[in-house]
Amino acid sequence: MNKKMIFTHITAAILCLLLAGSLTACGKNADITPVQTEISAPAETVLPQTSDTSETSPEYPALTPDRDSESASAAQEAPPENDSETILADQSFDGVDLGEYQNVRFTTSQVTRNGLSHAQYSLTDDGETVYTFPDAYTSWYFEHTINFITFRDINGDGKKDVITSEQYITGAGPEGALPFSMVRIYLNQGRDFLFAEGLSISIGNSLDVSNGETYTAENVLSVLEEQVYCNFDGSGGWTRGEIESFAFLVKQDVLTDNRQSLAQKVRYPLNIVRNGSEQQIQSPEEFVEQYDEILNMQVIYDGEGAETEGLFWNQDGVMLGTGAIWFGKMEDGSIKIYSIPAEVQYCNPLNVD
């Protein structure tokens, strides 16, 4: 090896030692701080899903653009004293009779919880709340506007139901600040009022959701009163309100195993088919007694998964699910279940009876 090559190797070694020393010194220098890259929050931060939001909700409410994710967390952890409830006096009414509640005040409130505002309805008697209606559409911001509130019997059961409409915003995306309208239909069950979500959305979607002026009581009621079922010659039929609300209530009874309630929705004698033979159930008492046989697993599965809007109908009546339950209007004008065939036309991988 010649001198020139030896010199080159020695020089390279010295340079490596000097470079290593300089890097070590940077690591020990207390006056030098590492550079931090600040990552700003997106302009539109979406709130996490709350516990009372169903998995089918199309979107969640978003924060306003000037908030970041840290403020979102703070809003969710806000102490109860930051919550508020404001009564909307111009949308509250005295002397209301609804179900078992007589001469009460129908109270409309704007309630803010964890930074989210929603409309809440309740019944009060002498200032004391005696009933609070189920929440709805809590994933969106209530925009302080009530389109209407009305009390009408939409299904012919002799009890006034509650129909309302409010305006909301999503707060997300380029159109997040544009208001849209939704409908709520609460079916009167005496002491309780059930929120018919599917029917409410279906009826509301029949109107222009972006135009609050179309969301009037008259327009919504006209949709509910459309005679679309068993209207063979165009001369008349059964309305969406009465048929689809009945289907909703039947499904609720199946879901909650409310045997007594379902027994009252049946016309007797009830025709059923079991093990290839026709049978008749003569009374509500017999229906409850033989409930497990009448509503076998096929019927329950079919009923639980059934849609309650846009139902199939023919000359025999209206079908729930894929044929597990058939119902229609009786001669006296009431709507009743008249057949539970049980020979449901759908895939049954478990081969249950």
Image (cartoon, helix red, strand yellow):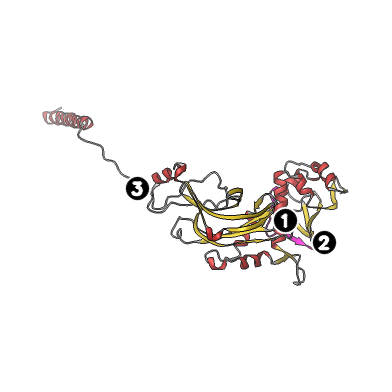
Q: How far apart are labels 1 and 3 at the CA level?
A: 52 Å
Q: Residue furthest left?
A: 3
The percent coordinates of residue 309 (x first, y second) are 67, 58
Q: Mark 3 Cα within 10 Å, few/some/many (few <14, many 20+)? A: few
The prevailing secondary structure element of the residues shown in magenta is loop
Circles 1 and 3 in contact, beta carbons < 8 Å: no
- Tell us which disc is closer to us: 2 or 1: 2
Label 1 SS: helix
Q: Mark 1 Cα within 10 Å, few/some/many (few <14, many 20+)? A: many
Foreground pick, 259 / 123: 123
Which residue is labeled 3 in the image?
Answer: 40
Is residue 310 shown in magenta?
A: yes
Seen in the image, is 79 located left or right of residue 182?
Answer: left
Q: Mark 2 Cα within 10 Å, few/some/many (few <14, many 20+)? A: few
- Residue depicted at x 41% and y 43%: 74
The percent coordinates of residue 153 (x first, y second) are 70, 60
Label 3 SS: loop
Label ID, residue 72: none
Which residue is labeled 2 in the image?
Answer: 332
Which region is colored magenta? 304-315
Foreground pick, 242 / 13: 242
Tag 1: residue type?
Answer: Phe
- Tell us which disc is closer to us: 3 or 2: 2
Q: Earlier in the sequence, mark 3 or mark 2?
A: 3
- Residue depicted at x 65% and y 65%: 221
Q: Earlier in the sequence, mark 2 or mark 1?
A: 1
Which residue is labeled 1 in the image?
Answer: 246
277 above or below 234? above
Give the quarter of the image for residue 16: top left
